[in-house]
Amino acid sequence: MGKRTLWGAVYAAVLIAVFGFSSISPIVLSVFTILLLNELASIQRMESRFPLLAFSWILLSLGAFLGFGGPKELVASTILYTILLSFTLLRAKQPALEIRRGLFAIAYIWLPLVFTIQNATQHPELILFIFVMIWSSDSMAYLFGRFFGKRPLAPTLSPKKTIEGMIGGIVGTIVIGLVANHYWELMPVSIAASLALSVSITAPLGDLVASAIKREAGVKDSGVFLPGHGGALDRLDSFITAAPVALILYQYLS
């Protein structure tokens, strides 16, 4: 428990430093993207892992040098990625299966993460706010679930998650979000509350989606990313779903 807590604190401190006090947040998120694609390909036992990682590395490198752009660049890079990957996977022993796995990786990892990277170039502090809301959601849901939890939320995927815990996580995240925004002065109160609410709902969903993927593959941890914390997918499963939804909501409300 001590080792897990220590590495969790180090992980949080690094993210705070990166997104709060540096300009390398797009690079860090790009590294996360490649790590997540690699773990997902490994979990799904993808035969052609190299093309999936190679094309993502090339496109992200181009983005780092030329600029990650906006919606047009996101759509164009995704279409190019999909075409190139599909052509290479036609040589696989099970091409249809490999293409389905590849397309799922693009939809599940590539699209939400690249969209997040594009926003991180302009608003890194907003990405940090989302991370803080995710941590708040996890902590408050755990505390409320431990003391008041009775009814399982998704007994097959995560027996320890409870409906009471999720309700507590929602309330606690909104409170913490409003307090954090009061001191950071990032956005109007109504937007901060809306983002905290969206994260408190989508973060547990992301965790359950990752649990479903790992359960189907018969693995407990997605890999080795932090000692005591499993792989990158184990640490970023909530972020994959919560970040893009919160960012879309922020753009709409702003």
Image (tube, helix red, strand yellow):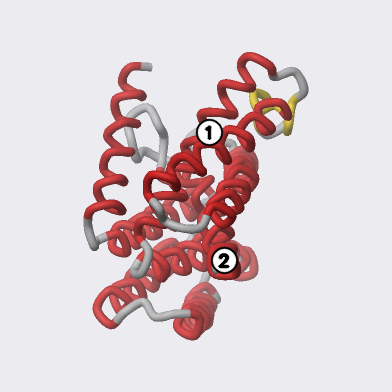
- Residue at x 51% of width, y 57% of height: 188
Residue 10 % position (x, y): 27, 34
CB under 8 Å between callouts 2 and 1?
no
Q: Position of residue 35 (x, y in %)?
A: 37, 53
Q: Position of residue 64 (x, y in %)?
A: 28, 74
Quadrant location of residue 245? bottom right
Q: Quadrant of the C terminus?
A: bottom right
The quadrant holding residue 100 is bottom right
Q: In the image, what residue type sits under mark 1?
A: Asp
Q: Is residue 93 visible?
A: no
Residue 76 in sight = yes
Q: Quadrant of the N terminus?
A: top left
Instruction: Give 72 or 52, whichever is nearer the viewer.
Output: 72
Q: Does residue 55 sit above or below 142 in this rendering?
A: below
Residue 201 is left or right of residue 238, and the answer is right
Identify the residue under disc 2: 248
In the rendered view, tell whether residue 254 sits above or below residue 160.
below
Q: Quadrant of residue 13?
A: top left
Which residue, as the protein is rendered here, is positioned at the far top? 147
Q: How many numbered tags mark residues here?
A: 2
User: Crowding at label 1, few (<14), some or many (≥20) Cα neighbours within 10 Å?
Assistant: many
Taking the spot 66% from the left edge, 33% from the top edge, the residue there is: 166
Q: Nearer the viewer, residue 136 or 68?
A: 136
Q: Which mark is residue 138?
A: 1
Q: Secondary structure at mark 1?
A: helix
Q: Residue at the location (30% across, 45% down)? A: 16
Residue 220 in the image: above or below residue 250: above
- Inspect the image, locate mark 2, and give the three-letter code of the amino acid beneath it: Ile
Residue closest to the far left: 22
Q: Earlier in the sequence, mark 2 or mark 1?
A: 1
Side of 75 relative to 19 (left or right): right
